Image (cartoon, grey):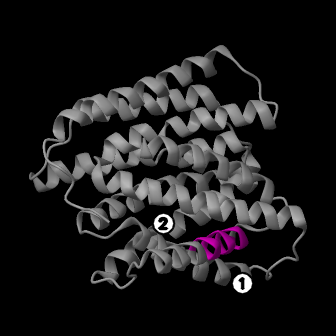
Amino acid sequence: MLMLASSFLFATMGVCVKLAAEQYGAGEIVFYRGLVGLLFIGALTRWRGGDLRTQIPMLHVRRSVSGVGALTLWFYAIGHLPLATSITLNYMSSVWMALFLMVSAVVLGSARVDARLVGTVLAGFVGVTLVLRPSFEQDQWLGALSGLLSGVLSAVAYLQVTALGRAGEPEYRVVFYFSLGGTVAGLLLALLSGGLHAHTWSGAGLLLATGLLATLAQMLMTRAYAIGRALANASLQYLGIVYSFVYGVLIFDESVTGSAILGMVMIVLAGITATLLRAPSRSTPPSTDP
């Protein structure tokens, strides 16, 4: 349920980013997204009496570097590619994650990856391609490369989130330091690329919505990865494509095709299968509790 809600909020955020990209650069959107998250989490932590001090700062640094890099590349791709294409490339993170875990299991010989779950992830990606039918022109190769690299870095970031959860870090602290990294990196990138643009009411509203939606989605996603299996959550994330498909029809007048409907069915089935495969392995309660 946490991942279902997170996927919906991330899909809604994607619409806001696509609209905001008409007025702002990728660095600016990352900056404001991080700033809103930083203020929101800081206020929430103070209100709840939480503690932002951490004993594992380097884990947060690694998570922020990979996560902010993925976010910046993805926002750039959204602004330079069709929305369907940029989302598809970013959602390849689950496939990269499966490959990372499989290689790690083979090299280290200390862990096993359920082949059925790997198959579920791959089947979900087939569903993604059927729904979104991605394509890009030759002059959009930089945006396409950015989207592809955002998927690779997202996979690295999600594995770092899992490590932080296992180490006992509460989700608000993980999201706070990620937001801090995004604020600093986004501001530097914006200043290097021409500075900050003047706001309009619609632009400011889109930036605020992006920050709030992303922060809440990030908290839900962080908790899901802290208590669940990485590949199971990766499969459930595919449901965000269903939400994006609906948004595309309602907001961007995208057409409904037979292949898209088939892809949606595959995505939903992949999510259900991942949940069923995950359930038997949870014989003990989660080791972390914020």
Residue 23 seen in the figure:
no
Residue 77 shows which numbered tag? none
How far is disc 2 from disc 1 in space, using C-alphas? 20 Å
Provide the residue designation for mark 1. Answer: 192
Report if residue 249 is visible in the image. yes
| Figure check: 24 above or below 187 | above
Whether residue 274 sits left or right of residue 144 in the image: it is: left
Q: Which of the two labelled residues, at mark 2 and mark 1, occupies the earlier sequence position?
A: 2
Q: Nearer the viewer, residue 51 or 239?
A: 51
Check disc 2 and report the residue beneath it.
Answer: 67
Q: Which residues are magenta?
A: 27-37
User: Is 260 left or right of 110, judged from the image as shown?
Assistant: right
Q: Nearer the viewer, residue 247 or 105?
A: 247
Instruction: Judge whether 31 appears above or below 127 on screen.
Output: below
- Where is residue 202 shown, x and y percent of the image? 87, 61
Point out the frontmost of discs 2 and 1: 2
Q: Residue at x 26, y 49 (%)?
A: 101
- As shown in the figure, which amino acid type bears the numbered disc 1? Leu
Q: Looking at the picture, how far across and down is residue 144, in whole percent?
A: 63, 50
**Is disc 2 placed on a helix, strand or loop?**
helix
Q: Which secondary structure dominates the residues rendered in magenta?
A: helix
Which residue type does callout 2 highlight? Gly
Name the residue at 73% across, 35% down.
248
Q: Quadrant of residue 118?
A: top left
Camera-side residue: 236 or 50?
Answer: 50
* Residue 98 screen position, x and y as percent: 32, 44
